[in-house]
Amino acid sequence: MYLLAHLKDLIEYKELLYNLAKKELKIKYKNSALGFFWSLLNPILTMLVFSLVFVVIFKFKGIEYYSIFLLAGLLPWNFFNASVMGGAGSIIANSSLVKKVYFPRELIPISVALASLVNLFLELLVFLVFIIVVGFLSPKYFAVFKFLPYLVILLPILFLFSVGLALLVAALNVYLRDIQHIITILLMVWFYASPIIYKIDGMVPPKLIPFYKLNPMTDIILSFKSVLYWRHAPNLNWVLLSLFYAIISFLIGYAVFLRLEPDFAEEL
Amino acid sequence: MALFPVKGRANKNVKGTAVTAQGIWKEFRVYHEKNQSIKEIFIKRKRAEYETFWALKDVSFAVKQGITFGLIGENGSGKSTMLKILAKILRANQGTVEIKGKVSALLELGTGFHPELTGRENVFLNGSILGLSRKEISKRFNDIVAFSELEQFIDSPVKTYSSGMYVRLGFAVATNVDPDVLLIDEILAVGDEAFQRKSLDKLYELKKQKKTIIVVSHALSSIAEICDEAIWLDKGEIKAAGKARKVVATYLREVNRKEEERSDNEDEERLATPGSRRGSGELQIKSVKLLDGRGKERSIFKTGDKLIFRMEYEAKQPIEKPIFGFTLYTRSGVLCIGTNSRIFGLVPDKLSGNGVMEYEFDKLPLLGGEYELTVVVHDITGMHIFDSHDKKYHFRVSAIDNSDIGLFKTSGSWRMS
Ligand SMILES: Nc1ncnc2c1ncn2[C@@H]1O[C@H](COP(=O)(O)OP(=O)(O)O)[C@@H](O)[C@H]1O
Ligand SMILES: [Mg+2]
């Protein structure tokens, strides 16, 4: 109830949320006209490196159009990664505001996630251009477009999950400043523990598969891959489980944040 | 001393109350050691070592709609802390704050600007923090820029601004976003004089528009002028509350009393401050005392007070026609007065042994400030110095409220014809 009342307040601050997100994007891309282009470079390079390793060096043939397969998981992961990493340092990065003016502080990590969301949309656009190119070689990939509407469900779930975790680490990082560094390492491990660069069936030893069910990112990544690579609707169980994890993450993250928030100004 | 009974709870039900603070307690931690990383906590096995102290103790007050309300008190008395609690930046340990309407705050040195954003972007960001839409901010934008006089710099990042520019823009934003309640901390302590004047005018304008304003300031005379009501905070407690003029007067009386007390303790030390001394020494000034009207030694005086420089001398041999003189300088070295006994017409034929020479200001003409005194004794030509204590003595004239500015009190008068 308490959370709901807060959420309602947030709607009144939509103008501020917009300005804060714009500010995040601006600072991220400042001093470079090619700012956004550089941010695209990250997924493209990651894609090239993994494609090189898997396809050229390991001569891995099990996944056709590995680059699409990879991007289908990498794009949502990058959004998650950017929201959590950006969220972790966000309160400190905005201390000049936090110490001087009042507004609901949760807007700060949320605005960071929104800025990452804008990035994700732009990356998805580039991804779709890529799909069109591939589609001329292998027309079945045009079907990706048919399943795109599923993103309307998947993106909010991904957003909710990411924001929940971002709120949690944002608040904790005010008190323990090296959370940021620990997060970096944890996220790297988490990345390899999620089925982004590989498939689960046929590649993960059966004994390990139960652990994947415990990884909250597994189902959301698999759902994105269903839509963007396999061209079919995501498994309903995956979607529901992701939604469950997202709600848990959001509730815990928000509750912890609201508890710690009133003393931020004193800690900064 | 008249103290107003204010310890009771603020009356919440007063009609048209814009701001109510009720039983506010605020405790700060003063850290000896603060571990802000997991690594440190792991190594040192504790998060922090600290003492606590209460910055605010049961502070209650109510501000009626449309009133200009002052918070006064010495440094460290908790004024800024109180304002931050009103602005929801800090959380009180106990007590409640209720504010009706939109609050705009200009806390210690400037509003919340993001250093990487330009002035323009910060204006829009701040506007939206205060709940204004883009359109509403656009409408006010020109006024804000014009008021801050930052036309040329509005598209530069604010991290390139000087602190004066920062404050100008902060003030312009805070006062132009149409707040219901305006909180201002020490605004009149920064910026150039012209801008201070302008800020004060703006506050008067808002006051006329019946905005509720709460100001914290050291510039007591301006507080007394603009404020309708005030409270005096002393070490986190309300010491007086009521009509601003009365509270300021009470406060000033207490400050002066304290200064005098302190000066009683400091006098010996102050007067013993070594300065350079030169002269041939046949005639020596053994001691110099600064006395008030009752013959008591002091180092702090008020404009208009009686002040006596009392010089005890010792002549090792008979000295013909010695001249005693003194010069007064401000701390920054401006010569204020230089005079001697010959100019006055007092030239003793011969001095020998011990004696006393005094100079008396019936009404000290100096205005508030720190002054340094040089005393000298020389022969009638002024060429031969027997003894001279250069800027060896210091005293302060405490600023009185509602006074002239400059170095000297005028003795002129105003007339209409
Ligand atoms: N964040 C803080 N941590 C610890 N002590 C503080 C903090 N902020 C203020 N104080 C202390 O609280 C007291 C009141 O400070 P303040 O409200 O700034 O006084 P004022 O504005 O009246 O000069 C001072 O002793 C100050 O040192
Ligand atoms: Mg202060």
Image (cartoon, coloured by chain):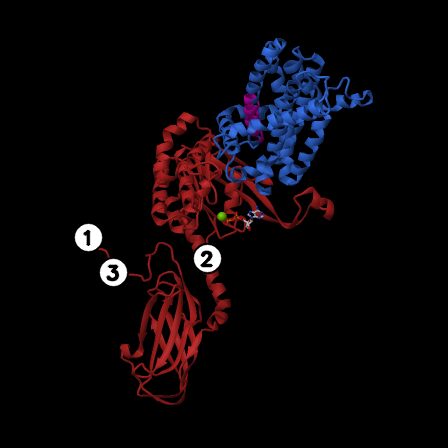
Chain colours: A blue, B red
Instruction: Determine if the magenta segment contains residue A120.
Output: yes
User: Which residue is under mark 2?
Assistant: B255
**At x 48% / y 26%, what residue is drawn?**
A15
Element on which disc 3 rests: loop
Q: Which residue is mark 3?
A: B412
Between label 3 and label 1, give the one nearer the viewer: 3
Secondary structure found at label 2: helix
Q: Chain of mark 1?
A: B
From mark 1 to mark 2, how far is it between C-alphas? 36 Å
Expressed as whole percent of the image width and height from the top left, the position of residue B3 reads: 48, 51
Same chain, labels 1 and 2 = yes
Q: Nearer the viewer, residue B24 or A34?
A: A34
The picture places residue B390, in percent across and down from the top left corner, at: 40, 74
Instruction: Please tell me which residue lies in front, B268 or B382.
Output: B382
Sequence-first disc among 2 and 3: 2
Name the residue type under label 2. Val
Q: Which residues are magenta?
A: A109-122
Q: Quadrant of residue B156?
A: top left
